[in-house]
Amino acid sequence: MKIKLEGSFDASVKFFFEDQLDSLEKNYYDYFEKTKVFSGKKDEIYCLVGPNEQEVFVGLGKADESTLQILRKQSYALGKSLKEHKISSAGIEVMDFKSKTNNRDFCALKAVDAIVEGLLQSAYRFDKYVEKTEDEEINIVLQVREGYEEKAKRSIEETSNLMEGVFLTRDLVNTPSNDMYPETLAKAATEKLSTVGVHVKIYGKKQIEEMGMEAFLSVARGSAKEPQFIVMEYLPVEGQQPMAIVGKGLTYDSGGYAIKPASGMVTMKCDMGGAASVIGTLYALGLNKVKKNVVGVVAACENMISGDAYKNGDIISSMKGSTIEILNTDAEGRVTLADSLYYAATKIDPEVIIDLATLTGAAIVAVGEQSTILISNDDEWANRVEKAGDDMGEYMVRLPMNEELREAVKGDVSTVKNSVSSGGGGSITAGIFLEHFVEKKPWVHMDIAGPAYSSSAYSYLPKYATGIPVKTLYKTIFDQSSSKIDMEEL
Ligand code: BES
Ligand code: MG
Ligand code: ZN
């Protein structure tokens, strides 16, 4: 898919609100009135493909109720329709949504972002392991209001780059663990990120030992694959305190001695979804040259079984020095994150730590497969992430911590325990465990066990890896950058 602002095209595409169909040309208005084939509803697309003219009508629902999310979804559906109807070039009229509605959600530039995103989403495919099919490339011409060309061009570029990051995350997650293991993940991070100004440092087993990361190493020990501690520095602004983004990097989670049944294990290549999101976000930030310092941290390993693997009942130490009783080897993500978060808090001195982790099955039970759980010790940062999620169309649900659950995470024979067997609240107790290692830095934890890897396609997202929450994370960081001000001044 190529999206430009100029050029010729075969098909004309127009968006309509269902309560503003009077802007239709009279002959179409009468035709739709009679046949009822198109009435502007938020899930309708009507393609008129004849020998002389090709017209596509896209519904957006009622003007006051329409949202950018509907525009993204419908632009995705439009992309799919163009392909299905073998339309290889289309001109899209980017109507002046704002003057047509009183809807706060819409402005011309946000509309361009949403349309570009939806279209690009429709062209994503993970085809690394299947025979390639050659699709004809679709050319899109966005027709924007005069005077808006420069801004629209920037919007197209920025959104396309952001989508590159989202798709990189998907590709990394979709690649199975026989090909995607700690070393290949580190290699992919280095290869991709070094092209966009991110400096990648990789620490092997010996250096991880020297740093005292006993918790991380305990999880990694059952695997034949060497663990990798990956630090990715994106520092475009001199002397600015960075944000730290920390991703859970289990390239495979068998559960270890608390072994998962095959049905729960088969998708566990997705357990590096947090790490892949860190890499995808940094890639997008670098491509867009966003002016904000960010350091990414990933402890990559596999959770496996062997004669030397860690066991249920072990008590291990950590970089912080706190001891952890391993009550369940399948609650391994928090154990690796203990050292990653402590590293971020003490070696990076960040203004905030945001971690992303496919951490608990309980998150799916609590909020469903589409939503991310947020847990935080800082209202301001939690609100920023929530707002960014809202802007980008990714669902964020914040859960509270309380004293009783905090008590439940404390160990009887250790500082903390990695699993709490009764009382429920599994996603919260996991969050509380993590909080112990952030050294009171402002911190937001995102549990993406549900949305990172989906059992079915929905909205404009594919089945399997979705790239959630790259858009939200990118937006959270972008909103803190001076690039935001530049963009507003344009
Ligand atoms: N990686 C899993 C969580 C997960 C489950 C991610 C489903 C994506 C989809 C995690 O390591 C895990 O196994 N968590 C356990 C924790 C429990 C033992 C306290 C879980 O959720 O069952
Ligand atoms: Mg597990
Ligand atoms: Zn896991």
Image (tube, rainbow, N blue to C red):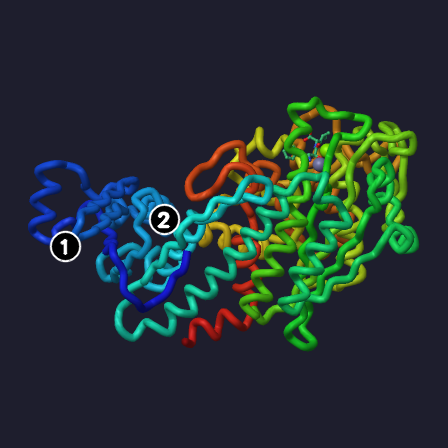
Say the numbered circle drawn on residue 23: 1
Residue 105 % position (x, y): 35, 55
Indicate left or right for 306 with 251 as reference.
right
Residue 208 % position (x, y): 87, 52
Does 150 sit above or below residue 443?
below
Residue 421 % position (x, y): 74, 25
Q: Are marks 1 and 2 in contact (CB under 8 Å)?
A: no
* Residue 415 visible from this viewpoint: no
The alpha-carbon separation of the residues under discs 1 and 2 comes to: 23 Å
Q: Residue at x 63, y 31 (%)?
A: 362
Q: Examine the image and state in which quarter residue 465 appears.
A: top right
Say the numbered circle drawn on residue 79: 2
Q: Nearer the viewer, mark 1 or mark 2?
A: 2
Q: Amino acid at mark 2?
A: Gly
Residue 316 % position (x, y): 89, 39
Q: Examine the image and state in which quarter residue 191 appears.
A: bottom right
Q: Residue at x 55, y 58 (%)?
A: 474
Q: Secondary structure at mark 1?
A: helix
Q: Nearer the viewer, residue 56 or 109?
A: 56
| Badge 1 or badge 2: first in the primary sequence | 1
Q: Secondary structure at mark 2?
A: helix
- Within the displayed image, which quadrant is ligand 3 positioned in? top right
Q: Residue at x 84, y 34 (%)?
A: 411
Does 146 sit above or below residue 439?
below
Q: Amino acid at mark 1?
A: Ser
